[in-house]
Image (tube, coloured by chain):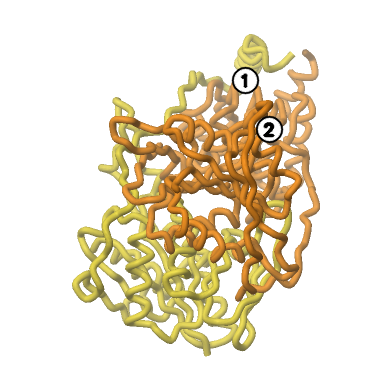
Amino acid sequence: MGGIWIFADTRGQTLELLNVGHRLAADRKLNLSAFLLNDPDGAGDCISRGADEVLLLPALADDQSLEAFLPVLVEEAKKSDPDMFLFAATARGKELAARVAVHLETGLCSSCTALTYDPERKAVVMERLAHGGAAVQKVVCRTRPVMATIPPGAFEPAEAVEGRSGRTRELPAPPPSRLKVLERKIKAREAQDIGEARVVVSVGRGFEKKEDLAMARELAAALGGEIGCTRPLSEEMHWLPEEACIGLSGAQVKPDLYMGVGVSGQIQHVTGIRNARVICAVNKDENAPIFSVADFGIVGDLYDVVPKLIQKLKQM
Amino acid sequence: MPTIIACFKWVVDEAYIRKGSSGDLVFSTVDFKISEYDRNAVEEAVRLKEAHGGKVVALTVGPPGATKGVKDALSRGCDEAIFVADTSFENLEPSQTAEILAAVIRSRVPDFDLIICGEGSGDLYAQQVGARLAEHLAIPCISFVQKLGVAGVSLTAERKVERYTEITSALLPSLVTVLPEINVPRIPGVKDTLTASRKPAATVRKEELPPVGEPRLQTIGIAAARMDRTCEKFGADEAELARFADALRKKGVIR
């Protein structure tokens, strides 16, 4: 049977994985199968965007989490022996993929950002970041199926093509889970979406107290941008909401202008600003790592520099 | 009185990795540390013990040099340590690490109640070992937990998924992986370091465990992530700031 299989928490992520899966499937003339969670109306959309087969999963019980599908996925995979099995790298997708990989006795490339079939190696070469973003690691999987998790947003959704056909198949409801969900709390959005902002002013540990962030907000306003921060400011000091955190385990930003103020430039943060068009930094430590990844760096005390910069921008 | 296992990894401190002239990575001057995320795992285990009694067993797998990490973990409040050491454990793949941890837990700490891992390691950040380990031991797994409580025979964990949090419960024994926001790890003092050297630390040799499987993922290359920037520096006086603003204007990022 074989083929390429994809699994994601939401239809939006499924469409992104279809893009990846369709390209790999076309290269090797394989079938592409997409799992779809409690969304039978989405089957046609998935087929028009590249799926040859849609595997419909029923709704979960209220007290079940996504991991409940583990036995269903493992059983299907053992029956059909897919060539590849791709998951969206969401919190629960990452966990589920790792657990599936144990049962299928195979390797898993986590947070994979590039996948290409290498005909010489007869293997899919997969790329991911390691060492906090300082390194790019290339791996191949020596066992079958080749598994990977793919970060949401890493690929565009697949395009719809008219006249494609495919089949759908309904899968059984999963057995009761040992893990019980007691309650779900929707997170209140506390901040603007910095992922799409044109200008991001990011604050770091160089700020001495929370009140001083007013200065950074004023700078952001003068530049027409949003406020972001390094992990300690949101997760340890709680000066800003967690949505403002930029980096490996926070938001990836791609503004025209990123300005790091009092940001030292630890690699985990820098990984999140890689796609900014212009990177600037203000830091009093001339040797701060941020300067080696910045286009323009001001060496100076932020408490001196920022008010002067605001003044200058207002004059312009 | 629960027995809690805190898993940790002794990793290269990425701050010391240098970029070679040909885009390679230079590890010759690196230092090592307990993976930052695992410090939260150790801290959470120790806090639970302080609240409920019982003991915390620190567990790691790695090359013999990681013995420094064992002492570090003990100074952070763990009661005893198990170190599975072998020179061949330098670059284990997540599937192998999880297998080894499972084997050592089965043979040395079979009566555990809870295993706590960090959300991922500071070097590979594959975020697989915790989930894989739970599966090998056939126990419930709750990952990305930001709040954890244990009461009697069950645990309650608040886990962060994308747009909401799930409050979940499971019976012990279970495994959780914790997020950095769950706690602020303590910084060991001189006294803690002194006490640490008197705590029991067992070293398990590779030969005492079932054979380790072959790696399933093969790393075919590792190179410095490129970030080509102009790296122009400016001073903080009026003239320099004017020059800075001018540079931004020329790039078209400010009006």
Task: Pick the residue in front: A230 or B159.
Answer: B159
Residue B116 pos. (x, y %):
50, 70
- Nearer-the-camera pick, A163 or A258: A163
The answer to whether residue A305 of the structure is visible from this angle is no
Camera-nearest label, 1 or 2: 2
Task: Name the residue type under label 2.
Answer: Val
Instruction: Give coordinates of residue B149: x percent, y percent.
Output: 64, 77
Find chain B in the image and tell me its colour: yellow
Element assignment for label 2: strand
Q: Chain of mark 2?
A: A
Residue highlighted by disc 2: A201
Q: Give the quadrant of the C terminus of chain B.
A: top right
Amino acid, disc 1: Asp
**Residue visible at 65% across and 28% down?**
A159
Residue drawn at x 65%, y 11% is: B246
- Horizontal and vertical percent for residue A22? 54, 34
Q: Colour of chain A?
A: orange
Q: Residue at x 58, y 29 (%)?
A: A281
Which residue is depicted at the point 52% across and 67% down? B186
Identify the disc placed on residue A71.
none
Subunit ID for the residue under disc 1? B
Name the residue tied to disc 1. B237
Q: Position of residue A315 (x, y in %)?
A: 79, 15
